[in-house]
Amino acid sequence: MNTYCHVFELMTRNPYCASPQTPVSQLVRRLVELKATAAPVIDESEELVGLVSLVDVAVSPEAGCVREIMQLRVHSVEHSASLSSAAQMMREHRVHRLVVTEGRRVVGVLSCLDLLPALGEKFGYFSNL
């Protein structure tokens, strides 16, 4: 039995990151290719400056580039954080994903769906399969 404890064990690694200058059409094509619903936005120094989701695109379909629609308030978590603290942060801030960082560098994304293996293991959801 595997016991998941840390964010880095379940996060989606090396996520697609957009820049503020990325055209929205390019963003959408890339997210669809990857079957992803959001992307961290990084500047030329590769530091996190925002988050953009398909919901942001749907709300502002006329936008030309990511800068126009990205969320500036981003919830992030260090890659070494515990899964329980990450889940608590998601609940507290009412978000479905956290950008995972190592220092100032984006190294992953942790979504609610990524937490399912740990929940299944902890509560025995998969024992009858």
Image: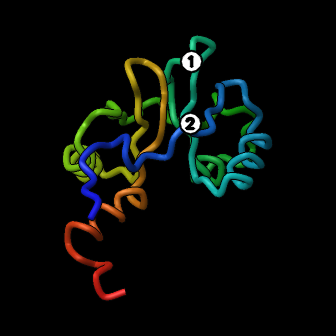
Residue found at x 78% / y 40%: 26
Residue 82 placement (x, y as % from top left)? 22, 42
Q: Residues within 10 Å of mark 1 (few under 14, many from 20)?
A: few
Question: In the image, is 28 to the left or to the right of 116?
Answer: right
Cα–Cα gap, marks 2 and 1: 13 Å
Tag 2's secondary structure? loop
Q: Is residue 106 left or right of residue 59?
A: left
Q: Could you tell me residue 83's position as x and y percent?
A: 25, 48
Give the residue at mark 2. 14
- Residue drawn at x 26%, y 68% is 121
Provide the residue designation for mark 1: 46
Would you call the spot at circle 2 few (<14 residues within 10 Å), some (14-19), or many (20 or more)? few
Taking depth in this image into account, of 53 and 6 the one nearest to the observer is 6
The amino acid at mark 1 is Glu
Confirm or deny contact between disc 2 and disc 1 (CB under 8 A). no
Percent x, y for residue 101? 41, 28
Q: In percent of the image, x 61 and y 52: which residue is there?
A: 54
Q: Please tell me which residue is depicted at 28% across the width and 43% down the height of the picture.
A: 6
